[in-house]
């Protein structure tokens, strides 16, 4: 595999919504939410569009990589849904940045960043691109039912981006589909066709929390076992485990079963919640800004999401 990351960026809404604010219109409390999820607040869009957030993240990643938009050969956006059903979010960001090359969206929910790395590596290995811009952006606030305290308290909005180019950092990448659509899904509407036998209005995100928890913990532990075996690594040789920030209890359970120190499992879920595909690149961007990652560090990344899908990868940081 031929890929390394040379720049990252983030784009976030201005509004931060606390658990106490949610408790003003939901039967919940800060204690109930934080003790069950590890979330204290989350960014929520008010006037911002998803294109606004995605473009801001992309611009920051380009500046961090000391590149211009004209240097980008391929733009990959990972999102459940952009501001339009069509054109894609990638086209909207391309318009803002002035890009004219390949641009496409990926919809693999929370595993979107791992899927985007996989696709980027193919472009780079085949020398169809020298620089690939990956933008993960989600507006979960428009997909959740704000009367359902079991789901709406979990999610936030935001974007994170990175620039990938040729390198040897990506040493392992694995993607798995484990079909179980009923566990976690977001129904789409059928419009108002007079020929539809069972028209359905647009729905909200549906999640069986207990089943997602069990699936996620088992899947990540299996990926840790697989990657350490494949790369002949001991689990403690991995410097950081960057897991999808879906729920603090999931991260705790994985860490406990793996019998590894807390310091190896960085998290930022307390102030962001679950932003689907955005969580891992957002965490990576913050850690790089804080100079927590150095050359030679081994990073394990794993995500799990609707479908159900699982993705993991290992980067030997360059």
Image (cartoon, grey):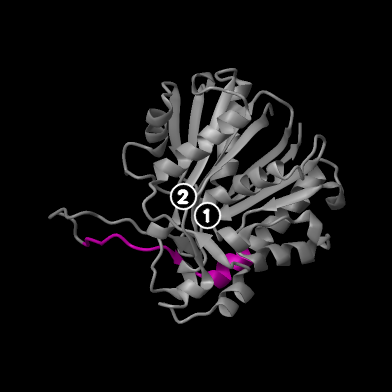
In reply to whether residue 202 is colored magenta, the answer given is: yes
Looking at marks 2 and 1 on the same chain, the residue that comes earlier in the sequence is marked by 2
Q: What residue is at 25 percent from the left and 55 percent from the top?
A: 190
Q: What residue is at 67 percent from the left and 28 percent from the top?
A: 3
- Whether residue 75 is visible to the viewer of this picture, yes or no, is yes
The picture places residue 311, in percent across and down from the top left corner, at: 62, 47
Q: Is residue 54 left or right of residue 270?
A: left
Above or below: residue 16 compared with residue 149: above
Q: Residue furthest left?
A: 194
**Helix, strand or loop status at disc 2:** strand
The picture places residue 155, in percent across and down from the top left corner, at: 50, 61
Q: What residue is at 53 percent from the left and 19 percent from the top?
A: 71
Give the crowd class for mark 1: few <14, some 14-19, many >=20 residues within 10 Å. Answer: many
Checking the image for residue 275, the label placed there is 1
Give the crowd class for mark 2: few <14, some 14-19, many >=20 residues within 10 Å. Answer: many
Asked if the residues shown at circle 2 and circle 1 are in contact, with their CB atoms under 8 angstroms apart, the answer is yes
Q: Residue 214, located in which quarter of the rendered image?
A: bottom right
Region in magenta:
198-215
Label 2, label 1: how far apart the Cα atoms are: 6 Å
Q: Is residue 22 left or right of residue 288?
A: left
Q: Depth check: give the residue in front, 4 or 96.
A: 96
Checking the image for residue 158, the label placed there is none
**Helix, strand or loop status at disc 1:** loop
Label 2 sits on residue: 138
Tell me the quarter of the image containing the C terminus.
Answer: top right
């Amino acid at each position: 595999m031929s890929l390394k990351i040379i720049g990252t960026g983030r784009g976030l809404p201005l509004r931060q919504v606390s658990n106490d604010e949610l408790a003003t219109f939901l039967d919940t409390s800060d204690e109930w939410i934080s003790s069950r999820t590890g979330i204290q607040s989350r960014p929520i869009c008010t006037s911002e569009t998803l294109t606004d957030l995605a473009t801001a993240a992309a611009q920051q990643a380009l500046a961090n990589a000391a590149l211009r938009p004209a240097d980008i050969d391929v733009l990959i956006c990972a999102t459940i849904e952009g501001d339009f059903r069509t054109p894609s979010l990638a086209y909207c960001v391309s318009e803002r940045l002035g890009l004219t090359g390949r641009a496409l969206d990926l919809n693999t929910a929370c595993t979107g960043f791992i899927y985007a790395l996989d696709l980027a590596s193919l472009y780079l290995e085949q020398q169809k691109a020298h620089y690939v811009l990956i933008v993960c952006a989600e507006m979960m606030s428009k997909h959740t039912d704000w009367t359902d305290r079991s789901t709406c308290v979990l999610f936030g909005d935001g974007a994170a981006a990175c620039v990938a180019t040729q390198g040897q950092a990506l040493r392992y990448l694995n993607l798995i589909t484990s079909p179980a659509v009923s566990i976690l899904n977001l129904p789409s509407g059928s419009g108002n066709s007079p020929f539809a036998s069972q028209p359905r209005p647009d729905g909200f995100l549906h999640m069986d929390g207990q089943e997602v928890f069990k699936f996620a913990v088992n899947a990540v532990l299996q990926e840790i076992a697989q990657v350490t075996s494949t790369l002949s690594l001991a689990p403690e040789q991995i410097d950081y485990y960057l897991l999808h920030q879906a729920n603090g209890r999931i991260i705790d359970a994985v860490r406990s079963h793996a019998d590894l120190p807390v310091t190896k499992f960085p998290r930022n879920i307390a102030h962001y919640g679950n932003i689907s595909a955005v969580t891992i690149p957002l965490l990576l961007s913050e850690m790089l800004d804080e100079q927590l990652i150095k050359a030679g560090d081994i990073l394990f990344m794993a995500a799990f999401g609707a479908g159900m899908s699982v993705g993991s990868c290992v980067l030997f940081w360059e």
